[in-house]
Amino acid sequence: WTEYLAELLNIKLTNYAYGGATSNSEFIQGCTGPKAEFHVYGIKQQIEMFIAANAKSNKSKKAKKVKDFSRTLFSVYGAGNDYFFSEMSASPLEVVQSLIDALHLLVKSFPTINTILIPNIHDLSRIPAYKTSNIEEKARISKHIESHNKYLLEHLVKFNRQTGVKIIYLKIDKFFKELQTKDGMNCFGITNCVDAAVNLYNNSDEI
């Protein structure tokens, strides 16, 4: 989605994201690959790589000032995988704090940052991985994500007060719920956003 946003705004995109990433791979390890066999860097580690790359750039140019990111839109989207890879055992409060800590690290390194876009998490009980879960389990998952989004908004308000950074809070949960309706899918020309596109958990290549 960041590619579409960059194209729409006609701006350069720099992307450090990894599919399957968690908020912090030292907190909960995220993975990717057909069998989730490859470890990936978490959001905190991605931010550290961004900091290192730009600090190196500043040093090479012998810059006297920290790089100006006042006109840069930062987007930090994640933490859903913290719950997926922990089998819903991760504490929403701890996951949110892990994400907020990463944001503080970013802003502390580059004080000129003034805008960050932060989407919340959609209801994971509605994704294909949990389609066969019973009603009680789906309700537990939904409640977990509701708690996450509640804590996230509260902590982002506090983060804004502490840093002065403008936060664009994107309600992905509401969009995702509407998208999974018949009208929602028709609106975007999608035929199916309920079932998995590829079955990765057997020996076939069923699509």
Image (tube, rainbow, N blue to C red):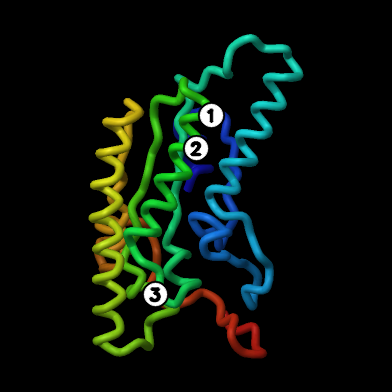
Marks 2 and 3, how far apart in space?
A: 26 Å
Q: Is residue 45 above or below residue 63?
A: below
Q: Nearer the viewer, residue 76 or 111?
A: 111
- Residue beneath label 2, please? 105
Q: At x 33% / y 73%, what residue is drawn?
A: 126
Q: Is residue 141 above or below residue 39?
A: below
Query: Dot 1 surroundings within 10 Å: few (below 14), some, or many (20 or more)?
Result: some
Residue 173 is situated, as x and y percent measured from the top left of the image, at 29, 58
Residue 123 is situated, as x and y percent measured from the top left of the image, at 31, 67
Q: At x 25% / y 87%, what residue is drawn?
A: 135
Query: Dot 2 surroundings within 10 Å: few (below 14), some, or many (20 or more)?
Result: some
Labels 2 & 1 near each other (Cβ < 8 A): yes
What amino acid type should be assigned to the residue bearing mark 2?
A: Leu
- Residue beneath label 1, please? 109
Q: Which quadrant would the C terminus be assigned to in this image?
A: bottom right
- Residue beneath label 3, please? 88
Residue 105 is situated, as x and y percent measured from the top left of the image, at 50, 37
Q: At x 25% / y 39%, what residue is drawn?
A: 157
Marks 1 and 3, how far apart in space?
A: 32 Å
Q: Tally the marks.
A: 3
